[in-house]
Image (spheres, rainbow, N blue to C red):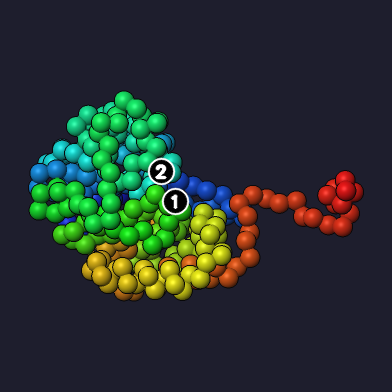
């Protein structure tokens, strides 16, 4: 449900986009493929583009914000080259011809050679100036591609962690459009571990204590006040909520891999044996 969007999660930072329903073990999980609009004094920056199906919603939400006086879209920052994060990239660049694409821009020139002159590389610490605030590329602690950068909005200290803090929410409980702290019936450790199990497979083979310590270090070093994940609900009480997500990551690492598809059980009488 997109009725609550655009939602201002920190002054001048707007949550936009829509949920995506996914079936897993007989349950329907709702996840976000969110985008965020940061409004500076002179320019706006879109963070992520949403799932390709969401472009009409994202475009409508941005239109509402521009009508309210938000400065024009000059920048698009995407955390990495994966469909739920950058799937609307071509349409954003086509619709907003003055917008530059920023971040790790590997391979985009192959998909969109016509926009190559509008692509700008960023390294850790590089900033996009929006007037009175900027978006900085920061260390991506939890990620699924090597090319990932996370973003930090420097005035309100909003972290955009891409696939970090990824978890689904309960549509039936009315969680769509709520921040994590408002979704009181959401079992954060459970939905975080389920998401990690399905989408962040490497967490099975890593010591997640080290990753969680590194997350704490990053949050402290950057003075993060709000977390704006692509798939999870935004986090507005970092101290209270981050440990619950970390508990899910640590639990997922200890669970045997469940796989993303239904499996045919292998028995001694099964086809694998008889074929051999
Ligand atoms: Zn993702
Ligand atoms: Zn939802």
How many discs appear? 2
Asked if residue 159 lies left or right of residue 198, the reply is: left
Name which quarter of the figure residue 25 lies in: bottom right
Give whichever of discs 1 and 2 has the lower sequence position: 2
Name which quarter of the figure residue 175 lies in: bottom left
Q: Residue at x 56, y 64 (%)?
A: 204
* Figure check: 107 above or below 136: above
Q: Marks 1 and 2, Cα distance to the nearest angstrom? A: 8 Å
* Figure check: 273 above or below 181: above
Q: Nearer the viewer, residue 178 or 212?
A: 212
Helix, strand or loop for disc 1: loop
Tell me if I can see residue 169 in this picture. no
* Figure check: 242 above or below 143: below
Tell me if I can see residue 201 in this picture. yes
Q: Which residue is mark 2?
A: 81
Q: Which residue is mark 1?
A: 145
Q: Residue at x 88, y 46 (%)?
A: 275
Residue 150 position in % (x across, y down): 32, 55
């Amino acid at each position: 449900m997109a009725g609550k969007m655009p939602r201002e999660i920190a002054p001048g930072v707007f949550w936009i986009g829509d949920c995506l329903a996914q079936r897993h073990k007989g349950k329907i999980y709702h996840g976000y493929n969110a985008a965020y609009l940061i409004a500076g004094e002179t320019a706006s920056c879109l963070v992520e583009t949403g799932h390709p199906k969401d472009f009409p919603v994202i475009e409508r939400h941005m239109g509402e914000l521009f009508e309210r006086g938000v400065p024009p879209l000059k920048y698009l920052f995407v955390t990495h080259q994966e469909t739920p994060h950058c799937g609307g990239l071509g349409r954003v660049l086509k619709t907003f011809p003055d917008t530059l694409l920023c971040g790790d821009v590997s391979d985009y020139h192959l998909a969109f050679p016509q926009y190559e002159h509008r692509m700008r590389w960023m390294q850790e610490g590089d900033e996009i100036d929006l007037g009175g605030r900027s978006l900085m590329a920061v260390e991506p602690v939890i990620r699924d591609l090597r090319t990932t950068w996370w973003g930090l909005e420097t005035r309100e200290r909003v972290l955009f962690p891409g696939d970090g803090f990824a978890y689904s929410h309960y549509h039936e409980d009315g969680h769509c459009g709520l921040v994590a702290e408002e979704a009181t019936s959401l079992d954060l450790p459970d939905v975080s571990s389920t998401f990690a199990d399905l989408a962040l497979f490497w967490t099975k083979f890593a010591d997640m204590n080290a990753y969680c310590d590194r997350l704490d270090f990053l949050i402290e070093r950057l003075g993060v006040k709000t977390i704006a994940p692509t798939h999870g609900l935004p986090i507005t009480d970092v101290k209270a909520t981050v440990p619950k997500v970390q508990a899910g990551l640590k639990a997922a690492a200890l669970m045997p891999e469940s796989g993303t598809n239904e499996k045919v059980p292998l028995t001694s009488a099964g086809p694998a044996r008889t074929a051999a």
